[in-house]
Amino acid sequence: MAQNTNPTTRKNIVILGGSYAGLSTAHYLLKYVLPKLPNRESYEVVLVSTASQTICRPACPRALISDEMFPQEKLFVSILGVFEQYPKDGFRFVQGTATELNHSDRVVSINLATGNTDKIGFHALVIATGASTSSPLLGLNKDEELLRSNWAEFRKALPTAKNIVISGGGPAGIETAGELGEYLNGRAGWFSSRLASPNVPITVVTAGPNILPALRPAIAKRAENFLAKLGVAVIKNVRVQAVEPPNAGTESVTTRATLILDNGKTMDADLYIPATGTRPNTGFMDKTLLSADGRVDTNASTLRVESAGPRIYAIGDVASYARPAVHLILTAVPVVCANIKRDLLLACGKEEKSVGEDRVFKEDTRETQLVPIGKSKGVGAAMGWQVSSFLVWLIKGRDYWLWTTGGLWNGKQWAKES
């Protein structure tokens, strides 16, 4: 049954997506933009998310092993709960999935969690729908219930697995290999370069000449050495061309798989985890609004989706303005919100000279990536400088950023307008 919530008396600022970009943008708008608009009571921030809870996605490589790895109340957080601090007439949460964006009529269609459909008209729109992972173990591809059920299924199969294959040499694949390697095999001694007889051999297959391509080869080689101590082997310059059965690792996380490699060889895996990057969640959008890689074609300076019409923006992994990275999302939030405020004031009839110029985003392209390898080791770089294993553990590896996400989810990250 279709509903239509496009009231003429309210100006909806709709945010699609309930993770880092969407929640941060909602907090910032409620704190610093809505209070500065004329007739503030006529505006409502409408946050739409497929899941009712948000999650620290970087923690998935460790969290998938056991609920004992992290406090579950910190790992999964109620979206509605963190917005109770704001006036109810200025915020609304909708649990559902965007199915169609009509950017001409400025309406977005939503499949609600209740099974109904909804059409929400918008005065302004922020697309922050993120990206989905190839493996349903490594992200909130739908909702928290699906993620938890996949983890439960995987955990039941883990004790009897005789070998594990992970495709993809990026951070998700390498972190997952490290966590599983240490959990199942332990770590080789100080004077051993590799674990000679792992309980469960783990293999990482990567199409590139090195793992962790965002980092310099010397750092990637160090990561490979750490993995060897955990019973993890790396096969480079080889791509997984096909999987039999095709749903192994993607729809079913425990189906035994045969991997057909592009070098003509095959590999069998009791457990197969595809960690070959992410897919932007843009299936509800007109393809004319997308860039060649499927992300939303976004002005790299202002974060506007200029081809979609006025007051439409994109931020986070779904947008083309920068490479996917949490620290770049946090840099972009004040920029997109400043430009939303400027555009809303202009739409109210304010003169351009009174609202100032656009705020401009500039991507930090310096080598920055931290990759834990098990619970005590790691490799990485920050702002172009190599980071020691101890610092990788201290900053990320001890709890995969969980020490930072509380302030993000509840808005304390944005205690001051920046």
Image: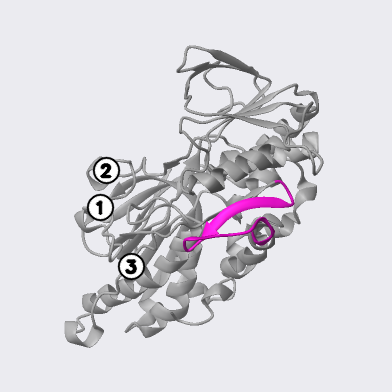
Query: Quarter of the image holding residue 221?
Result: top right
Asked if residue 138 can be seen in this view, the reply is no
Whether residue 45 is situated above or below residue 417 in the rendered picture: above
Q: Is residue 385 magenta?
A: yes
Q: Is residue 366 magenta?
A: no
Picture coordinates of residue 272 (x, y %)? 62, 26
In the image, which is nearer the foreground, mark 2 or mark 1? 2
Whether residue 176 is situated above or below residue 347 in the rendered picture: above
Whether residue 351 is situated above or below residue 148 in the rendered picture: below
Name the side, left or right, on which 384 lies relative to 226.
Answer: left
Look at label 3 and name its amino acid. Phe
The residue shown at (34%, 61%) is 125
Between residue 174 and residue 325, name the one nearer to us: 174
The residue shown at (79%, 26%) is 197
Q: How much space separates mark 2 and mark 1, taking CA atoms? A: 9 Å
Q: From the image, tell me which residue sits under label 3.
A: 361
Q: Which mark is residue 103?
A: 1
Whether residue 65 is situated above or below residue 320 in the rendered picture: above
Are circles 2 and 1 on residues that touch, CB within 8 Å? yes
Between residue 125 and residue 206, name the one nearer to us: 206
Helix, strand or loop for disc 1: loop
Question: Which range is magenta?
Answer: 374-391
Q: How is the image coloured?
A: one colour
Look at label 2 and name its amino acid. Asp
Query: Quarter of the image holding residue 166?
Result: top right
Helix, strand or loop for disc 3: loop
Q: How much space separates mark 1 and mark 3, taking CA atoms? A: 24 Å
Q: From the image, tell me which residue sits under label 2.
A: 286
Are circles 3 and 2 on residues that touch, CB within 8 Å? no
